[in-house]
Amino acid sequence: MSDYTKMWQSLGLDLKNHDALLSVLGKAYSDIFLSQKNRPEGMKYFDFVMSEVHGLRIKELMDAKAQGRKVIGSYCVFVPEELVLAVDGVAVGLCAGAEFNFEGAETLLPRNTCSLIKAAFGFKLGKVCPYLEASDVVVGENTCDGKKKAYEILGPLVKDLYVMDLPQTKSEMGRALLKEEYRKFIAKLEEVSGKKVTVASLKKAVEIVNAKRMAMKRLAAIRAADPAPISGLDALLVNQVFFHDDPLRFTESVNKLCNELEIRVKNGTGVFPKGTTRVVVSGCPMAVPNWKVPVLIESSKAVIVGEESCVGERGTRWLTEVKGNTVDEILDSITDRYFNIDCAVFTPNPSRVDYVKEMTKKLHAQGVIHYSLQFCQPYIMESGPVERELEKSGVPTLRLETDYSQEDTGQLKTRIEAFVERLKKK
Ligand code: BJ8
């Protein structure tokens, strides 16, 4: 990696903290990812992206800013990348996947806050997230109570926090609220960028984001093969890079990877032996570098074949079907697309469990591992009904509740191994 010290300094990063973070990250990455056997060649691109995730990609953001483009950071898949691209902005996901400076975070937040929210604060207070520091606007969204209230505390700590309200029910009024919020978000983006959203810019943006999602859908479908042509860990990594990379380059790289995986499927080549126990993981999003549970699963003689998660199919499975020829009509299509997202903050939320069942069937999985972050009320509350419904339909389900620490890995591993044994006997 080139020397990016000056750039990090100019962003106000704490170099000592940042070096410490990068060295832990680099070691974890090589232990977890580079040690896997028989990885697809196409993963080399994603290895490169990860090695430069705080380097070259940030340099690209800084270059874009120098050209007058705005960087818009966010923590949720309800923030439409299409709208950011329509004002020639750059959309980035913000760091929230590692246990870093939780002591600092806990000076501002209650201890019993989920790790994802604590991580966002730990990164901010420790000054180690270049994406956050490079963002011209940080978008908060009123989803769960934790995030909603946390944004009130985050506001004074960042340059420009823009909070978007979100509906909690899939009703007419809920949809109208979402559309109105997206309309207000367009106004905000136009104000900060000085550019107007036009029919042409919006259509182009939809095309770019649809292509990115289509590539992810292609990858998801290929994972139905046995033997699995790609590990769940590598597939998760691609889903995580989705939030950081340049969209056009990302789409091209995923499609290249898929070309290779399709050949593997034809030749019967896999990363695990044919007949390896297959599971779907469902629940809270796993932001980079949250790889803890997938590592435990894939070292327990099982392979993850799909993620029902916002860093997974919940974030990518719907495309925007453009109907109409005005900005307002296209915004209707975008709203329809996002209104499908079945996050557990919605009540009721029946389509989520239906889709977990569908995924299990089409990906030939023997069971589901439900993953909740500790203190995440929406997903923990929903995990009981999801488990009961899946078990009733003959899909064995294991409910896990954990955080970003490594303290419970022994206990989790024992439970996962016992679950995999149960699936084998099925
Ligand atoms: S659309 S899942 S990305 S809100 S884990 S912070 S829910 S207490 S992340 Fe999410 Fe958008 Fe929904 Fe997806 Fe709260 Fe739970 Fe923490 Fe969470």
Image (spheres, rainbow, N blue to C red):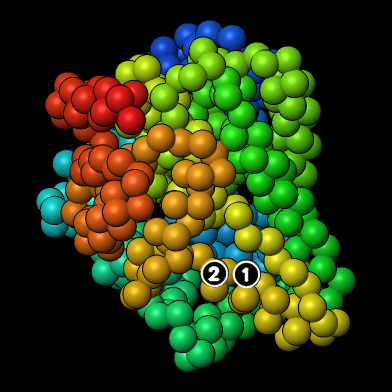
200 left or right, relative to 330: right
Q: Residue at x 53, y 8 (%)?
A: 37
Q: Residue at x 35, y 64 (%)?
A: 344
Q: Do the residues labelled 1 and 2 touch (CB within 8 Å)?
A: yes
Q: Can residue 364 be seen in this view?
A: yes
Q: Which mark is residue 74?
A: none
Mark 2: which secondary structure?
loop
Circle 1 crowding by C-alpha within 10 Å: few under 14, some 14–19, many from 20: some
Circle 2 crowding by C-alpha within 10 Å: few under 14, some 14–19, many from 20: some
Residue 248 image position (x, y, % from top left): 77, 44
Type of amino acid under label 2:
Asn
Type of amino acid under label 1:
Arg
Q: Residue 340 carries which label?
A: 2
Residue holding disc 1? 337
Residue 77 image position (x, y, % from top left): 51, 59
- Mark pair 1, 2: CA separation: 6 Å
Q: Residue at x 73, y 56 (%)?
A: 210
- In the image, residue 323 sits, relative to residue 137, either above or below, namely below
- Quarter the C terminus occupies: top left
- Quarter the N terminus occupies: top right
- In the image, residue 311 sits, relative to residue 199, either above or below, namely above
- In the image, residue 128 sits, relative to residue 185, either above or below, namely above
93 left or right, relative to 200: left
Residue 119 image position (x, y, % from top left): 31, 45
Q: Residue at x 44, y 60 (%)?
A: 354
Q: Can residue 192 be seen in this view?
A: no
Query: Which of 253 and 359 lies nearest the eye of the viewer?
Result: 359
Q: Residue furthest bottom?
A: 173
Mark 1: which secondary structure?
helix
